[in-house]
Image (cartoon, rainbow, N blue to C red):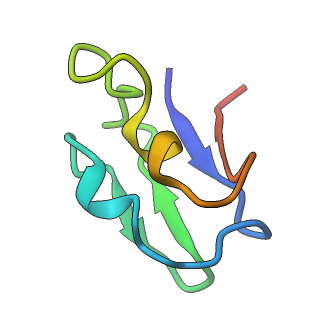
Amino acid sequence: MALYIVEDECISCGDCVPECPTDSISESLVAFKISEKSCTECEGEADSPKCVDICPIDDCILPVA
């Protein structure tokens, strides 16, 4: 599984970047993005995804369907 950032919701604060243990979050032209290839949803690192926990915007970071 992996997560993605909803570009229309992201305020580009960058709070999620240092929280990611797999360095899967990077800045794109519009907002931040999460690499589906390396995102583990913090499995084995935390009880819940750290980026979701730190994000100030509800429903900005969601699971890939």
Query: On screen, 55 above or below 28?
Result: above
Q: In the displayed image of the protein, which residue is found farthest to the bottom?
A: 29
Considering depth in this image, is 43 or 46 the residue closer to the camera?
Answer: 46
Drawn side of residue 57 relative to residue 25, left or right? right
What residue do we see at 66% from left, 69% from top?
Answer: 10
Identify the residue at image location x=64%, y=77%.
11
Expressed as whole percent of the image width and height from the top left, the position of residue 33 reads 50, 61
Q: How far across and how far down the image is residue 12, in percent?
A: 55, 79
- At 50% from the left and 30% from the top, the residue drawn is 2
Q: Return the residue nearer the eye: 27 or 59.
A: 59
Q: How many marks?
A: 0
On screen, residue 34 above or below 12:
above
Q: Residue at coordinates 28% horizontally, 51% vertically from top-left? A: 19
Judge from the rendering whether residue 7 lies leftward or rightward of residue 4; answer left or right: right
Please identify the quadrant where the C terminus is shown: top right
Residue 37 pos. (x, y %): 37, 37
Q: Eyeballing the image, is 18 above or below 40?
A: below
Please identify the quarter of the rendering in which residue 50 is found.
Answer: top left
